[in-house]
Image (cartoon, grey):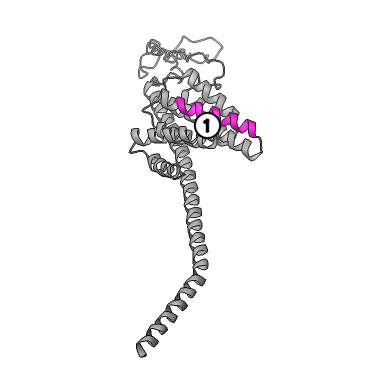
Amino acid sequence: MPLRADVAALQSSVRQLKAQLDAVAPQVDPRLREQLAESDRRTAALAQRVEALTTTLTRLTARLDELAGRVEALSRQLRSAPGRPGSGAPAAPSVTAPAAPPPATAPPAAGGAPSPAAPPATASPPAVAPAPPVTPPPPVAVAPPPAPTPGARPGTGAPQPQDLYQAAYLDFSKGNYALAIAGFREFLRRYPDSDLADNAQYWIAEAHYSLARAHADAGRTDQTTQALQQAVQEFRKVVANYPRGDKAPTALYKEALALLELQQPALAQQRLQYLVDNFPQAEETLLAREKLAALKER
C-alpha cells in the first residue's frame, strides 16, 4: 500500500540521518574541545598580560611617589634656606679725600737770590677737609651647615630619605635584588615614619619574589621555595604594618600568587577573599575575583 511505502521511506531516511549524525559527531566534539582549549589559552595569556601590566603600574606608581617625595623635600629645603644678603660681596673700601697739593713756589729771580714764596691764587678753592672713613655694615651671621654624617654625599649635608630610597629602587630596577633589599631595610631603619615606608616594605617583598623567579628559571628548586616563603612574609608585613597604605591591595594579590606557587591554594584563596572584602575599589580586586573563580572551578 502507498502508506506503508511512505512509512518505509521515512524510516529509511531516519536511518540515513542517524548514520550521518553518528559519522559527524566524532568530528564535532574534537572541534569543540579545540575551541575551548584555545579560549582557555587566550584567557591565560590575557591574565598574564594583565598581571604584567599591574606589576609595571606598581613600579611606575612607586617611581611617581619617589619623585613626589623628592620634589616635596626640595621645596622644604628652599623654604627653610636662609636668605642671601650679599655677604659674599667685598666690603666697600674707606673713602678719604685726596691730600691737598703743596703750595707753589716762585721760580728763583735773576741773580740767584730766592724770591719770597708767591701767595696762592685767589681763584683756587679752599682746601677740603678729609672725609671720615665709611664703615661697612656688619656682616649678617649665617648658621654653619650641619656636620655630615657617615654615608652622606659630600657637600650635601645629612642624607635625605628620598636619596636612600632612590638608591635602593635603582638597585631593584637593575636587578640587584640583594642590594635593593639591604637598601630598603636601611631606609626603614632610619626613617620608619616616612611616607615612603610602606613602599619600601613592598619593594623588599617584590625583590624576594623576583629572586624566586630567577631561581626558578635557573632550576634551583630549594632556593626558589625559600625565596617564595620569604616573599610571603614580607608581603604580609605590608598589610600588617600599613593596612591603609597604597600598597596593601597589591601586596595581598602578590602574596596570593606566591602562595599558589608554593602549592597552598586554600591559603591563597583566603588572602584573595580578604582583598575582595576589604578593598573593593582597588585595581587588583578584579584580578582577585578572577583568580577566586578559577580556584573554585578546580
Q: Is residue 45 above or below residue 269?
A: below
Q: Is residue 159 above or below residue 118?
A: below
Q: What is the chief secondary structure element of the magenta stretch?
A: helix
Which residue occupies the foreground of this view, 26 or 295? Answer: 26
Q: What type is the residue that disc 1 sits on?
A: Tyr
Q: Is residue 108 above or below residue 242?
A: above
Write the start and end of the magenta stretch as one range.
221-237
Q: Is residue 69 left or right of residue 163?
A: left
Residue drawn at x 56%, y 19% as measured from the top left: 151
Which residue occupies the foreground of this view, 10 or 44? Answer: 10
Q: Is residue 181 left or right of residue 220?
A: left
Outermost bottom residue: 1
Q: Is residue 217 above or below residue 5?
A: above
Residue 226 at x, y percent in the picture: 59, 28
Which residue occupies the foreground of this view, 15 or 30? Answer: 15
Residue 105 at x, y percent in the picture: 48, 13
Residue drawn at x 40%, y 82% as measured from the top left: 10
Q: Is residue 225 magenta?
A: yes
Residue 100 at x, y percent in the picture: 43, 14
Asked whether the viewer can see residue 200, the reply is no
Which residue occupies the foreground of this view, 87 or 90? Answer: 87
Q: Is residue 150 magenta?
A: no
Instruction: Identify residue for label 1.
Output: 169
Examine the image and state in which quarter residue 194 appears. top left
| The N terminus - image quarter | bottom left
Q: Tag 1: Cα neighbours inside 10 Å, few (<14), some, or many (≥20)?
A: many
Examine the image and state in which quarter residue 73 appears. top left
| SS of the residue under disc 1 | helix
Asked whether the viewer can see residue 228, the reply is yes
Residue 295 at x, y percent in the picture: 45, 42
Outermost right residue: 219
